[in-house]
Image (cartoon, helix red, strand yellow):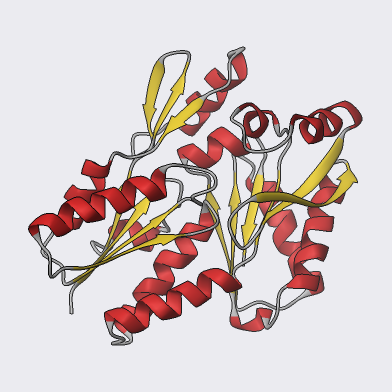
Amino acid sequence: MSYRIVVDSCGEFTEEMKKDPHFVHAALHLDIDGEEFIDDDSFDRLDFLKKMSASPNCPKSSCPSPEVYREAFDCGADHLYAVTLSAELSGSYNSAVLGKNLYLEDHPEAKVQVFNSCSASVGETKIALKIQECEEAGMSFEETVEEVNQFILDMHTYFVLETLENLRKNGRLSSVKAFVASALNIKPVMGATDQGVIIQLSQARGMQKALRKMVEVMAEEVKNPEEKILGLVHCNNRERAEYVKEEIKKFIKVKDIVILESSGVSTLYAAQGGIIMVI
């Protein structure tokens, strides 16, 4: 059976995924002081970081329209899937559901599933790859949906950022946490609930200690890590991602570690040097 997996552009693609026609992106749009950036192959991370740093205002993001999703579904594939940012963080999930409903109006027999990642960034990547794994294994649409929903429940998301200001200003966490972290150089280790709500898991003074603490928290929480692929996303700091990779090896053994550069949306929130980890 043919299939298509539509991922909103917060989910980074590996080089293999970029070449695979089964995967397509639904681009979010970013804005700094009225200048629009499209989160697609044209996105210039360094230019965006420079302009974001120079601006006194907080950058904004807007999710793909329902029509963007509807068009992405309209490809003739038998099985259609979408993977979006956590519905607690973005309107992308609701937009994808509306796009699905628009498509079903003209194709009432179509099999379409929209997955709320309850995560972001490489969490979406992992879900998209899990869908492909199920499809390539010959699982039915219904079996794939059930398997992937369980996969999402079992996923763990973590991140450590240099600053939480963009998350705070866009209403993604409390201003108190952002202020304390900035004033005392305390770097919170952040994570997400099963529903995709951002929470603080721990903290440490300084970036390296916080990254190490993030790995420690992950190692304590994750079950059967040797069966899992761990995704690492960095915002313009490959060296820091490699440091986290080496720390992970000290604590647990995983099936594989994939390192990717941040998408436009991840860059907006992670900012220079941010690290996102999903397993």
Counting the numbered discs, the total is 0
Q: Residue at x 75, y 66 (%)?
A: 218
Q: Is residue 128 left or right of residue 211?
A: left
Residue furthest to the bottom: 138
- In percent of width and height, residue 76 lies at 10, 64
Report the front residue among 35 and 172.
Answer: 172
Q: Is residue 213 left or right of residue 276?
A: right
Q: Is residue 68 visible?
A: yes
Image quarter of residue 77: bottom left
Quarter of the image with the N terminus in it: bottom left
Report the front residue among 44 and 199.
Answer: 199
Q: Residue at x 16, y 72 (%)?
A: 78
Quarter of the image with the C terminus in it: bottom right
Q: Is residue 74 visible?
A: no
Q: Residue at x 71, y 40 (%)?
A: 161
- In percent of width and height, residue 173 lies at 69, 38
Image quarter of residue 236: top right
Q: Is residue 82 above or below residue 2?
A: above
- In percent of width and height, residue 194 lies at 61, 63
Q: Is residue 42 above or below residue 88?
A: above
Q: Is residue 226 left or right of residue 187?
A: left
- In percent of width and height, residue 153 lies at 57, 71
Q: Is residue 152 left or right of residue 197?
A: left
